[in-house]
Image (cartoon, rainbow, N blue to C red):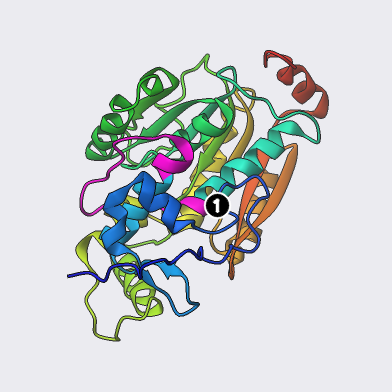
């Protein structure tokens, strides 16, 4: 039986330093409010060492319940769920990426909102987290691609449970395992942004070792066996060449459609991979490259953005957005 939250417990979990100022989760988790919106979260809430309520972040069922409550309370997303064995993404960090992308599109001016802004989410996964949050925050339209048919089926169920989302978020299967953009982006299709959280590891063995390290960092013993649905599916965790190899393929393919996307972007988890990515972008002929830092608590992250368009071309591109 899971511990129940202490009666009268009102204190929220401490804020996450470094989150984007527009991030709805920058003030921490208001567990009483979340439980009121989604009562199924309540059995997982417990008193944390800091004195306020929290959950066991090593328990995949607790993390899933927290995500479901956050998506319902903050974004009005109903019926969110993922199958066993798939990654349950940390929502504050995913939202942060989207807010920084909005700043990138704004270029110091007005953030473009509405369905005229088209975004490609490469590897949308079973959770479809980026399209869900991005559409609710900014009204953007999305295409979510993935090589995993079961993941797309899960994402489709979420969209079907929320009226209007099936029109705003399209799902496409990538049928070429080693391709990233090819086969997903049509020859006459244009996107304002691409976003991606690439597989980190270069092999299944590396992925398993990484899961074990994460499990130990969350307070589990040296020999503890991770819960099956804590680690994620293979395609979510590893690919040939790992993060660096995947990003290199993305850069190479982006150079073949330079005028179809305003800004290509991808998360880079390991800063040691940045020099190779920058070198690949120079070789590909990118006109401008930006590295945007992000932070969530003690975790430091960043994403790389690049474009093949000149500043003049980018200004002309923005005129496509209605209301600007």
Residue found at x 49% / y 57%: 29
Q: Is residue 181 left or right of residue 304?
A: left
92 in the magenta segment? yes
Vertical arrangement, residue 227 with respect to residue 247, above or below: below
Q: 221 or 70, which lies in front?
A: 70
Which image quarter holds the N terminus? bottom left
Is residue 161 in sight in this rendering? yes
* Residue that extends furthest to the left in the rendered view of this protein: 1
What residue do we see at 59% from left, 22% from top? 117
Q: Position of residue 24 (x, y in %)?
A: 57, 47
How far across and down, in percent of the image, does residue 297 sit? Answer: 58, 67
Residue hosting label 1: 25
Which residue lies at the image location 33% right of the left edge and 62% below the top edge? 203
How many numbered marks appear?
1
Quarter occupied by the C terminus: top right
Q: Position of residue 75 (x, y in %)?
A: 46, 37
Tell me if I can see residue 307 in this picture: no
**Dot 1 crowding, Cα within 10 Å, few <14, some 14–19, many 20+:** many
In the depicted view, which residue is nearer to us: 282 or 307?
A: 307
What kind of element bears circle 1? loop
**Above or below for 148 versus 9:** above
Where 89 falls versus 315 (above or below)?
A: below
Please state the horizontal and vertical placement of residue 188, each as a whole percent of the image: 53, 14
Q: Which residues are magenta?
A: 71-93
Which quadrant of the structure image shows residue 293?
Answer: bottom right
Magenta highlight on residue 211? no
At a point 33% along the width and 35% down the height, the residue shown is 78
Residue 57 in the image: above or below residue 117: below
Residue lying farthest to the bottom in this orientation: 222
Q: Main secondary structure of the magenta part?
A: loop
The residue lying toward the viewer, choosing from 32 and 121, is: 32
Q: In the displayed structure, does residue 45 sit left or right of residue 10? A: left
């Amino acid at each position: 039986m899971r511990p129940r939250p202490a009666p009268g417990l009102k204190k929220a979990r401490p804020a996450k330093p470094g989150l984007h100022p527009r991030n709805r989760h920058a003030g921490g988790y208001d567990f009483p409010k979340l439980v009121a919106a989604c009562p199924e979260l309540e059995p997982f809430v417990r008193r944390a060492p800091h004195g306020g309520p929290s959950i066991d972040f090593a328990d995949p069922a607790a993390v899933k319940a927290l995500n479901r409550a956050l998506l319902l309370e903050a974004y009005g997303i109903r019926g969110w769920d993922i199958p066993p064995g798939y990654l349950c993404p940390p929502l504050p960090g995913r939202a942060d990426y989207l807010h920084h992308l909005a700043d990138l599109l704004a270029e110091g001016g007005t953030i473009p909102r509405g369905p005229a802004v088209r975004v490609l989410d490469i590897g949308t996964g079973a959770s479809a987290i980026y399209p869900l949050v991005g559409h609710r925050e900014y009204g953007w339209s999305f295409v979510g691609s993935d090589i995993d048919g079961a993941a797309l089926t899960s994402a489709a169920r979420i969209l079907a449970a929320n009226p209007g989302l099936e029109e705003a978020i399209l799902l496409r299967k990538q049928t070429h395992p080693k391709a990233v953009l090819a086969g997903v982006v049509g020859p006459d299709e244009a996107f304002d942004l691409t976003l991606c959280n690439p597989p980190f590891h270069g092999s299944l063995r590396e992925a398993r070792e990484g899961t074990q390290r994460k499990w130990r960092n969350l307070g589990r013993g040296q020999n503890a066996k991770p819960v099956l649905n804590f680690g994620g599916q293979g395609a979510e965790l590893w690919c040939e060449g790992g993060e660096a190899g995947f990003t290199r393929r993305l850069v190479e393919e982006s150079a073949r459609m330079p005028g179809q996307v305003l800004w290509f972007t991808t998360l880079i988890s390991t800063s040691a991979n940045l020099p190779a990515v920058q070198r690949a972008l120079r070789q590909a002929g990118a006109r401008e490259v930006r590295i945007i830092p992000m932070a969530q608590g003690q975790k430091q992250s960043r994403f790389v953005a690049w474009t093949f368009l000149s500043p003049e071309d980018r200004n002309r591109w923005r005129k496509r957005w209605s209301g600007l």
